[in-house]
Image: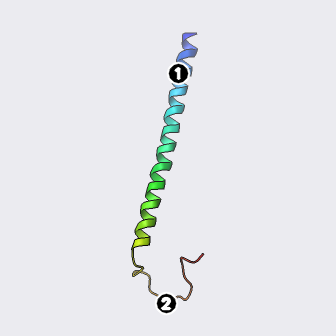
C-alpha cells in the first residue's frame, strides 16, 4: 500500500509541476507578446520605408 501511495504522490507532484510549468510558460509568453505589441504600437514605424501602398497592419 505504501508503495502505491508513494507512486501516486510522485505522479501528482510531477503532474502539478508540469501544470505549473505550462501555466508559467503561457503567462510568460503572454507578457512577452503584450510587451512586444505595446512597443511596436508606441514606436513610430520609421524602420519601414513607405514604398509599398498596402498597409502591413491592415489585415
Q: Position of residue 18 (x, y in %)?
A: 51, 37
Instruction: Label 2, secondary structure: give it.
Output: loop
Q: Which mark is residue 34?
A: none
In this view, the residue farthest toward the right is 59
Vertical relation: 45 (above or below) 37: below
- Which residue appears at 39% of the width and 82% of the height? 46
Left or right: 47 in relation to 23: left
Vertical relation: 48 (above or below) 26: below
The chosen color scheme is rainbow
- Which residue appears at 58% of the width and 15% of the height? 4
- Which residue appears at 40% of the width and 78% of the height? 44
Quarter of the image with the N terminus in it: top right
Q: Earlier in the sequence, mark 2 or mark 1?
A: 1
Q: Position of residue 39 (x, y in %)?
A: 40, 68
Labels 2 & 1 near each other (Cβ < 8 A): no
- Which residue appears at 55% of the width and 13% of the height? 3
Q: Residues within 10 Å of mark 1 (few under 14, many from 20)?
A: few
Give the CA distance from mark 2 to mark 1.
62 Å
Instruction: Label 1, secondary structure: give it.
Output: helix
Residue where numbered disc 1 is placed: 9
Q: Residues within 10 Å of mark 2 (few under 14, many from 20)?
A: few
Q: How many marks?
A: 2
Quadrant in the rendering for residue 59: bottom right
Vertical relation: 16 (above or below) 25: above
Residue where numbered disc 2 is placed: 51
In this view, the residue farthest toward the top is 1
Q: Position of residue 57 (x, y in %)?
A: 54, 76
Amino acid at each position: 500500500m505504501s508503495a502505491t501511495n508513494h507512486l501516486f504522490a510522485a505522479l501528482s507532484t510531477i503532474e502539478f509541476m508540469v501544470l505549473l510549468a505550462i501555466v508559467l510558460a503561457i503567462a510568460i509568453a503572454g507578457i512577452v507578446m503584450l510587451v512586444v505589441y505595446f512597443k511596436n504600437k508606441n514606436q513610430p514605424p520609421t524602420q519601414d520605408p513607405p514604398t509599398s501602398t498596402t498597409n502591413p497592419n491592415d489585415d
